[in-house]
Image (spheres, rainbow, N blue to C red):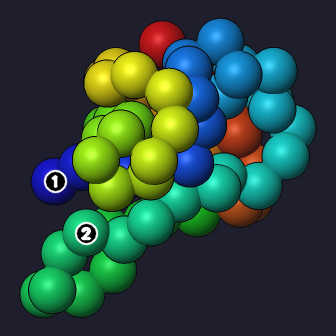
Amino acid sequence: MTLIASYKSKKEMKASIGQPLLYIETSMFGPEYISNGTMTVANRPHITGTGREWFGQVTMENDKIVSVS
């Protein structure tokens, strides 16, 4: 499963380390977001209207971004 990240680039998301994740849920079967752990995220310009398409992994701890790869 992949969350839609509301960032123009992975660099912009990395600059948000220590902040809550800005995202759009994509699953109609329940929440994909987890407050502690690693998730796959992507920017889909046709959905967000900004930036270009990219994919990455974000690690969360207590609802804060701790790493982006």
Are the residues at dot 1 and dot 2 in contact (C-beta closer than 8 Å)?
Answer: yes
Q: Is residue 15 left or right of residue 31?
A: right
Tell which tag, 1 or 2, sits nearer the viewer.
2
Asked where in the image residue 26 lies, by quadrant, the reply is bottom left
**Residue 9 image label:** none
Residue at 66% across, 28% down: 13
Badge 1 amino acid: Met
Task: Indicate whether 18 appears above or below 62.
Answer: above
Q: How many marks?
A: 2
Q: Which residue is mark 2?
A: 26
- The relative height of residue 47 versus residue 24 in the rendered view (above or below) is above
Q: CA distance from mark 1 to mark 2?
A: 8 Å
Locate residue 66: give its quadrant.
top right
In this picture, is 33 found above or below 50?
below
Residue at the far right in the pictured view: 18
Q: Amino acid at mark 2?
A: Thr
**Residue marked by disc 1:** 1
SS category of the residue bearing label 1: loop
